[in-house]
């Protein structure tokens, strides 16, 4: 039986870690949809578009090709044939991704690639609109939402590990701003699907979050998936 799981939630909630762990445990393909928006954000930045004028990306979309490829179970993101998987992980590109993700033409542009991956099944996808738009008929929908302070702390630790200099307060302010952009945009706002199950993983380790999510998945599928 093909399983399709949607994980949504705000920036820094631990969605990608959770989705990767579940993908590994259940043998599913993990699709990180934020990487697609980040790749378009990177293109916008390199084209000299200001974040405040993100809609200007619309006319450049015909020049952009974004692909997801998998090697050793790891997702790689290609922008016009170049592997940009690392380049898209900076705080600056996070803000660009948030800005371009509010542009309707960008969402439309990235819809097909996501729907295609969703259709292939045996998949766990994470993002903001997976349960509402990309896989409204997913078998299980989880909305992961720890507190903003907790998310800022985790994101700051991640950035520090990658030697990206910034203060925890800066990361917190970025998170609050991005949350507000993502929740209040007109198209596909980052809100939970009606049938999503909330998981507040504040104070949880990655293992505890995975365990809680696997319980939700087991209960929902009404059978043991492990
Ligand atoms: O998950 P992330 O931080 O890599 O996402 C980057 C940005 O992309 C985020 O600010 C919101 C946007 N995004 C979105 O609008 N819809 C998705 N399915 C995934 C990400």
Image (tube, rainbow, N blue to C red):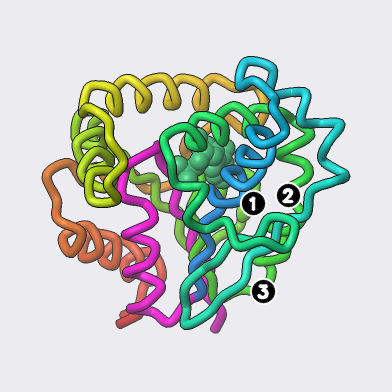
Q: Which residue is mark 1?
A: 134
Considering only order in the chain, which callout, 1 or 3, is on the residue closer to the N terminus? 3
Describe the element under mark 1 as helix, strand or loop: helix
Q: Secondary structure at mark 3?
A: helix
Residue closer to the observer: 89 or 183: 89
Residue 94, numbered circle:
none
Q: Residue furthest top?
A: 52
- Asked whether mark 2 lies closer than 8 Å to ligand 1, one says no
Tell me where residue 152 appears, x and y as whole percent.
25, 33
Q: Quadrant of the N terminus?
A: bottom right
**Apparent side of residue 173 relative to residue 179 in the rendered image (left or right):** left
Residue stretch in magenta? 1-28
Q: Position of residue 79 (x, y in %)?
A: 68, 55
Query: Residue at (55%, 60%) from the top-left corner?
Result: 138
In-front residue for pair 207/12: 12
SS category of the residue bearing label 2: helix
**CA separation in Å, label 2 and label 1:** 7 Å
**Comes first in the chain, label 3 or label 2:** 2
Q: Residues within 10 Å of mark 2 (few under 14, many from 20)?
A: few
In the figure, 217 relative to 225: above or below? above
Instruction: Name the residue rendered at 55%, 66% in the picture.
Output: 76
Distance from disc 3 to disc 1, alpha carbons, whole Å, reads: 13 Å
Cα gap from disc 3 to disc 2, whole angstroms: 14 Å
Where's residue 202, x and y in %?
Answer: 17, 41
**Quarter holding residue 67:** bottom right
Q: Which residue is mark 3?
A: 120
List the residue tagged with mark 2. 111
In the rendered view, would you say 205 is above or below 182? below
- Residue 17 within the magenta-colored segment of the rendering: yes
Compared across the picture, whether 153 is left or right of 10 comes to: left
């Amino acid at each position: 039986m093909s399983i399709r799981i949607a994980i949504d939630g705000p920036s820094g909630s631990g969605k990608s870690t959770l989705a990767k762990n579940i993908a590994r445990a259940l043998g599913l393909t993990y699709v990180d949809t934020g990487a697609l928006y980040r790749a378009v954000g990177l293109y916008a930045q390199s084209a000299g578009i200001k974040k405040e004028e993100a809609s200007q990306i619309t006319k450049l979309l015909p020049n952009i090709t974004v692909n997801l490829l998998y090697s050793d179970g790891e997702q790689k993101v290609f922008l016009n044939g170049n592997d940009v998987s690392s380049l898209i992980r900076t705080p600056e590109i996070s803000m660009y991704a948030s800005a371009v993700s509010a542009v309707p033409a960008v969402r439309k542009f990235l819809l097909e690639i996501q729907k295609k991956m969703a259709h292939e099944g045996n998949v766990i996808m994470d993002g903001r609109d997976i349960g509402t738009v990309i896989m409204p008929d997913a078998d299980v929908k989880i909305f992961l939402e720890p507190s903003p302070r907790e998310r800022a702390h985790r994101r700051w630790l991640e950035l520090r590990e990658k030697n990206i200099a910034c203060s925890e307060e800066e990361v917190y302010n970025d998170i609050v701003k991005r949350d507000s952009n993502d929740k209040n945009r007109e198209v596909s706002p980052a809100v939970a699907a009606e049938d999503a199950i909330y998981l507040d993983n504040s104070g949880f380790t990655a293992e505890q979050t995975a365990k809680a999510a696997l319980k939700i998945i087991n209960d929902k599928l009404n059978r043991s998936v492990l």
